[in-house]
Amino acid sequence: MTYEHILFTVKDHVATITFNRPKALNALNRALLAEFANAIDQVEDREDIHALVLTGSGDKAFVAGADITEINQLDPLGAKHFARQGLDAINRLPQLPIPVIAAVNGYALGGGSEMALACDFIYAAETANFGLPEINLGIIPGFGGTQRLARLIGANMAREMIYTGKMIDATEALRLGMVNKVFAPEQLMAGVMETAAVMAQKGRVALRAAKQAINNGLNVDLASGLALENDAFALCLASTDAREGTSAFLEKRKPDFKGTLSSS
Ligand code: CAA
């Protein structure tokens, strides 16, 4: 598939998907969502990709939401399909076996915030703004915002943001725990790539196990979550990486992780 609405690059084991409709502030239309899903297939299939970064083209927006021109034409059944297409694409992110960082370089509104919220964590430029302004359009968030925002920052703060449609800046998003780190705009990508590179050097089996334990554990009670962690911990010890990591520590050298399960 050739991409018209996204850019897809891989460098030093880190893939970057750039939402690339700057004239529409990178709004998510059906065509873009199809390309995004295809790029995620590639990320999932390629073992040389150890981390994924999402960002937006231009200096104004990460993603200003789902495409309002398309939403304007939808009937309820069409809305269900449209939201399902967006949700299906976005829901792939927590399922990926590698970490995903959202590099939010401007407006992350509606579907843009929802995309960022499905990433493992968010780094933002000082100029970023977050919001779920769907209420101003007579609709509600449709790509997971009512669920993921409430789980991340608490139901009351999420209610206030969703009922008023107000935007918050990067400092406030940091305070609420929505964003991990804030950068000067020109330093955002360097900061993101530095962290991505650190994670990309870790063992793939352990990264995947940690991601699954955290994500699946968040949806169950503590005892069930701890049982998930126990299984995931045990799985790590079936990897060559666990032998290599522990041996390297004992031998006082740097580990050389291969990301495979041991054959013995
Ligand atoms: N969909 C389609 N086009 C969009 C868009 C969107 N979500 N956001 C911006 N654009 C377009 C504008 O229509 C405009 O196009 P033209 O130049 O052809 O007129 C262009 O991008 C630039 O936008 P503005 O002129 O509005 O730029 P601004 O600097 O004055 O304002 C903004 C920036 C505050 C982000 C404003 O564009 C805005 O409020 N955008 C809409 C945000 C929004 O409501 N998002 C939620 C969408 S619904 C959703 O996401 C539902 C869901 O959960 C699935």
Image (cartoon, rainbow, N blue to C red):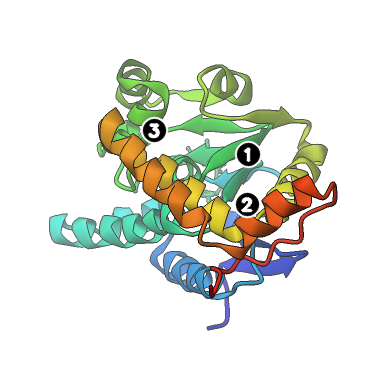
Per the image, the residue denoted by label 3 is 133
> Mark 1 vs mark 2: which is more N-terminal?
2
How far apart marks 2 and 3 lie (CA) works out to 19 Å
Q: Is residue 162 above or below residue 82?
A: above
How far apart marks 1 and 2 lie (CA) works out to 8 Å
Q: Is residue 103 visible?
A: yes
x, y percentage for residue 19?
Answer: 58, 58
- Is the C-beta of the residue carrying label 3 under 8 Å from the nearest atom of ligand 1? yes
The type of residue carrying mark 3 is Pro
Q: Is residue 145 visible?
A: no
- How many callouts does the rendering have? 3
Residue at 44% across / 51% down in the picture?
234
Q: Horizontal placement of 220 versus 38: left or right?
A: left
Per the image, the residue denoted by label 1 is 106
x, y percentage for residue 203?
Answer: 64, 56
Q: Label 1 crowding class (10 Å Cα cut-off): few <14, some 14-19, many 20+? A: many
What mark, if any, has residue 224 been given in the picture? none
